[in-house]
Amino acid sequence: MQPEKITTLEGNEAVAYTAYRINEVCAIYPITPSSTMAELADQWAAESKTNIWGNIPLVSEMQSEGGAAGALHGALQTGALTTTFTASQGLLLMIPNMYKIAGELTPTVFHVAARSLAAQGLSIFGDHSDVAAVRSTGFAQLASASVQEAHDTALIAQAATLESRVPFVHFFDGFRTSHEVNKLTLISEEQIRAMMDDNAVRAHRSRALNPDHPFIRGTSQNPDVYFQGRETVNRFYARLPAILQEKMDAFHELTGRAYRLFEYYGDPEAERVAVITGSGAHTLRETVAVLNRSGEKCGVIHVRLCLPFSAEHFLAVLPPTVKAIAVLDRTKSPGATGEPLYSDVVTTLAEARAENRLPTEGLPDVIGGRYGLSSKEFTPAMAKAVLDELKKSQRKNPFTVGIRDDVTHTSLEYDPEFNIESDEVVRAVFLGLGADGTVGANKNSIKIIGESTPLFAQGYFVYDSKKSGSRTVSHVRFGPNPINAPYLIQSASFIGCHQFNFIEKIDVLERAQPGATLLLNSPYGPDEVWDRLPHRTQQQMIDKDISFYVIDASGVARETGMGSRTNTIMQTCFFAISGVLSQDEAIARIKDTIRKTYGKKGEEIVEKNFLAVDRTLEQLYRVTVPDHPSSAIEMPPVVPPQAPEFVQKVTAMMMAGKGDRLPVSMLPIDGTYPSGTTRWEKRNITDSVPVWEPGICIQCGNCSFVCPHSVIRAKFYNEDQLDEGPDGFPSAPINARGFPETRFTLQIYVEDCTGCGICVESCPAKSLQQSGVKAINMGPKAPILERERRNIQFFERIPVNERSRVEFSTVRGVQFLEPLFEFSGACTGCGETPYVRLLSQLFGDRLMVANATGCSSIYGGNLPTTPWTTNSEGRGPAWSNSLFEDNAEFGFGFRLTADKHLALATQLAREFKEEIRSGLIDEILAAEQRTELQIRQQRMRVAELRTALEPIDSEKARNLLSVIDHLVRRSIWIVGGDGWGYDIGSSGLDHVLASGRDVNVLLLDTEVYSNTGGQMSKATPLGAVAKFAASGKTVAKKGLALQMISYGNVYVARIAMGANPQQTLLALREAEAYPGPSLVLAYSHCIAHGFNLRDGMKQQELAVASGYWPLMRYNPALRQSDHNPLVLDSPRPRIPFKDYAFNELRYSMLARTHPAESEHLMTLAQEAVNQKWETYEEMASRSGSRFIPDASVNR
Amino acid sequence: MDLSTTYMGLQLKHPVVASASPLSATLDGFRQMEDGGVAAVVMFSIFEEQVREENEAFSRLMEAGSESYPESLNYFPEVSTYEVGPDRYLELIRRATEQVDVPVIASMNCATTEGWIEYAKQMEQAGAHGLELNIYRVEADFGIGSLEVEQHYLDILAMVKSAVSIPVALKLSPFFSATGNLALRLDQAGADALVLFNRFYQPDIDITDLEVASILDLSTASEIRLPLLWTALLCGKVNASLGTTTGVEGANEVIKYLLAGADVVMSTSALLRHGPAYATTMVDGLKEWMEAREFSSVAQLRGNMSHGKVANPSAFERANYIKILQSFRGEVLSAWR
């Protein structure tokens, strides 16, 4: 037998490793936190890695999880060993097929990184809500509690499903297990082979649909037999626990790792027992071990097989001494008598007593509680609180633990200081930025230690809710024994603070234990740094007796050509200080890892990293901590004092990373949050911001038009206003005739800027005298910050320009419209948000947005702060996200209500004709509401009606008032990305656009699933590389515009702001004005395209110049007058496709990985471009009569 | 008629060679040049600094935005093998040497000692028939004197020569205080060929946008003079082959360079302007001229107008300058009359 292979893996990889080797087909769809499993399977298939049968599994990305489940069902029915990887809403979309698969007794294992379900809000984090939601499908449910277990259980489940014919959901905690890196022993191919029964595999194949031995399955059954048929499967479920245990035993034989359906840990004479499944079981096990040592009679039953719940096996492990049981569920079943595991335990005990099978003296008391929803921490302190609750005579049932429920008082108190971690374990917490490589370096450190020393290692990484300037916190443990601590480090022996400014913003030492070490990346040396620390930090350092080290890692990185990547430097310091390895050994291993990590990227990158390592130690200093704090620096308040109460009390807590402390009473009951909270969060994530040059500026509006974070604002105003302004407040005479006393100011919101530089690249005005100087230029923020704060304050006092005085039809005019979408957490240089902001400027005060899940729902609606905001009248976009797949239908529902309530308001208003001012009702009902002026006038009329109605004491008046807002025309927009519009929501989009109703769709086309990390969609172009198209996509992008044009009554436009902002503006306004369905396809550059997004708009221009993205508008209204409804807005292609494409990594990387294929695909891609252009050109030159007539408009 | 020539030890069927141009960027371009009738191809230059920058950009862009947001911890599929460094260039050498019959001379410009040595070795292994060192530098550091600059050329040559056994050519800048002296020293140091000259990038200024404009025009026939002068001066003085480039518009320039003493005549602009088949037109023009003058071989005419053989050698020196001035003055004077 070969020696065991020890490695360090993330949970997802550990599962995929096994699943890939024992399946022939994987039908998948990306969803967090399971996506990595599918991506790895696809990657391995692309690398021609074989399964244990010597063939390469087929990995197929479908259009939705519903599609994946269908494909999976089909593959299973035809005899292939098939699996999928999913989570949350994805698992829910599989439910219909799960019933079929189980009803047909089909062996398969779904690997689920268990995640919350969207309820009052979406959450990507881990709990068992999804798994609980599929309990009645007929799938067995088997849980893994650690990375090693997930790796092993994937195999055990497969063996058991093949023999039992009952399909399995194998689940493990999303993020906590799926994303934890831990040391594990790999199952060898031989061991996998030994676990797989070829007879069972052949039996599966023999049951397959086969025209050589035909039968039918999937019949439609009637009342006479359906019920009996349903009962035929019972014995398979009855046999399953025994089969599973046999497979676990066989696995034990092969590997030495033993598993049981239920495992008991603790005192054999325990009186108090907790029951739990998933990673929390390890927390309880470790806690129980500590409590037992102090004589407490308690224990824990760790449940692996959750369904079918084997009463026999459960009772077999229950200590006969037990008097009280607490069952913990990581899900919530509102209104139920209890959550699933609790209900199973209660039922089991009750039945056992009835049947006289109870192992205990009497029926133990049972309480049930919820913990850990959405990756809420479940710590030993909480575990202890649960066991302590059982000591009480009055116990909470149901209870919650880990939160403070001050409304229904379910929560248990716990002692946050209770700590069971061993001193043998090095516990390190590293605070970094996504961009500085901290997480990557820590993953490397874990590999170094886990794979080349006898030590064990664990890493878990907490990320940000923002996509730009995001912070990361790495929790890393090293120790001599296996590390089963599935909770964040509470008491760290080492804190690495990789960004100096964190010291001023967050409580860096919060998790530091007494005597801990702090390593700070500081531009200030050992003699200077102390005076630069806030008073509070100094006091903490003294109180906690912190050993303090500094290094100017950013300086070393600059000197050695590493740019902003301080990761290797900080990693070297960690090893030098922590003593986990000897310094020489650590450096040798770091270098070895550098070579492994970067070797394939070129020798020079390796050399730079080596140099950085070598330069590090000479610049690492220990700082003597004085006895007394001396600093006058105070931590600034999280939000300014003028922020609203909710923001002060709730939002600010979340912003400060203290949201866990918010009690139930502080949170909205139904997921309703106030708009416009990003304005209170001054993130200051860039050192370099745009600076305006009034003397050069031509006031064209380009810069504010393209700004992804709405930080460039313009106003014009009477020059008298300047009298009240701060000294030097920049302004210029307005660049328009007939306004002699009017000034213009462009104000940059420097604290909200992300430093992308797109504005500078889009600025057409250059200095006539000085090379390289434009009307807007990037410059350092620090020297102008205070000045700009004052300027912004004054700027905000200048009245917003009256909308009816602004020219909506020009880019220049639009800059004066207030953005009602601002300071989002989108990526620096995002290509989507400028369109979204523009929508809010044009239609914001009457805008309703249905937003598909994806990037736009994350930067649009991810707490703590959200960017959709209100104007000075308190009006603004009403925004909501339903799901990923249903967004078109969701927005369509908005339209139905608007139509219905407009009709109702109209009907009720007519009934008031006699009572209200003569003519007002007629004016309201007859009002044309197309222009901004007309809408303003209608608002005034409606306000007058409201005033008239309010004193009337009648049901009719109150009813009219309840729908009166609908008398002002609403602008209903359905917003989403290409993953939604081209794939998962495609049929809904198609149906809604075909409905003829007045909805507007803004499809932000990044040509990949951006939010989940760049997976291929049907919008991905031919020749581009994406996840699931690692060898380049071989099918051309779907012609969605042409498809929708074929309906005849859909307004369709293709826009690309960077190529023609004026056309973008025109198209959005036409789409909105068109009284039927509209689809606007917006080219959106994206970080997943692989180029410096500062050039995003230029790249858009090239996309259009190459003919790849023709700009066009199809306006069915033109068809009525026999005009050609299709207008082509861009000139003929003037550059080859590759001159655009090869600027982007998504195209150019194929030239490095598959040069011949790249050449081939680029040729085809050019042909596709040529053909697409010819099609549009031909259509644009047809007579109008050759297009489908539009009955809805003609009517 | 014998049109053959020997260039840096390579036997060529005639002296018209394609010099570095975008045509050599693809295998298809190589085939077109072969079909067009060139005797050898000097590939486009690979710049070590550019390769490094591209590698770094690749690495940076692969990692951009990674490990930041929990739903998208990276944005590109992990790829286990891909080309880095000069891999793509080397692959092109390999495919070109396998699939076309004309000799392939790789061209390189490196920024580091390791770069020169490693690239040279790899190009030899990839099958290049020869190397051209395109040492292109504008010495903007005024602390570096002429001797140092010259020594730099010699050092690079020595490094590369010691690393490979295929012939090595050196493409020279036209601007040295003592071009002839340097040429002799390079010749003694083992250069297999000297190529006259590098037409290096000379930026322009855009007065509308106040930007430095990077414009590289194709050469014209009038630019032939300087390389012609030095070819004529060096012919017979060095053992190294002489390659000439710049301003080769047609057969006339080919003939002139050969008469001055060139072993091969390289053209980029004409092949780009007229297509690769123009090489045959140039060779035909050369043949016609030779037939009319009853030359039976290129060897016979090579260097006939070199400094060493021309009837009035001083015409290549200061005398030429004086003569032009005199004629110029003559014109001026006549205008005054």
Image (spheres, rainbow, N blue to C red):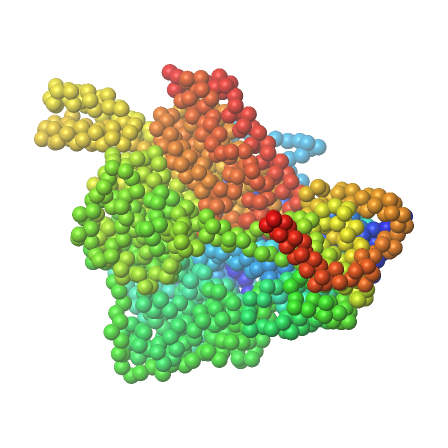
Q: Quadrant of residue A353?
A: bottom left
Q: Is residue A1023 left or right of residue A115?
A: right
Q: Is residue A729 above or below residue A922?
A: below
Q: Residue at x 52, y 21 (%)?
A: A1182
Q: Please say whether residue A203 is visible from this viewpoint.
A: no
Q: Quadrant of residue A544?
A: bottom left
Residue A706 at what x, y percent from top left?
A: 39, 45
Q: Is residue A336 left or right of residue A743?
A: right
Quadrant location, the N terminus of chain A: bottom right
Nearer to me, A1150 or A782: A782
Nearer to me, A708 or A96: A708
Quadrant location, the C terminus of chain A: top left
Residue A679 at what x, y percent from top left?
A: 28, 52
Q: Is residue A1189 left or right of residue A1150?
A: left
Q: Is residue A1117 above or below residue A987?
A: above
Q: Residue at x 44, y 32 (%)?
A: A1053
Q: Quadrant of residue A843?
A: top left
Q: Is residue A200 left or right of residue A817?
A: right
Nearer to me, B67 or A1173: A1173
Residue A777 at what x, y percent from top left?
A: 39, 54
Residue A916 at what x, y percent from top left?
A: 12, 23
Q: Is residue B163 above or below residue A307?
A: below
Q: Please say whether residue A1181 is visible from this viewpoint.
A: yes
Nearer to me, A866 or B301: B301
Q: Residue at x 21, y 43 (%)?
A: A741
Q: Residue at x 17, y 47 (%)?
A: A720
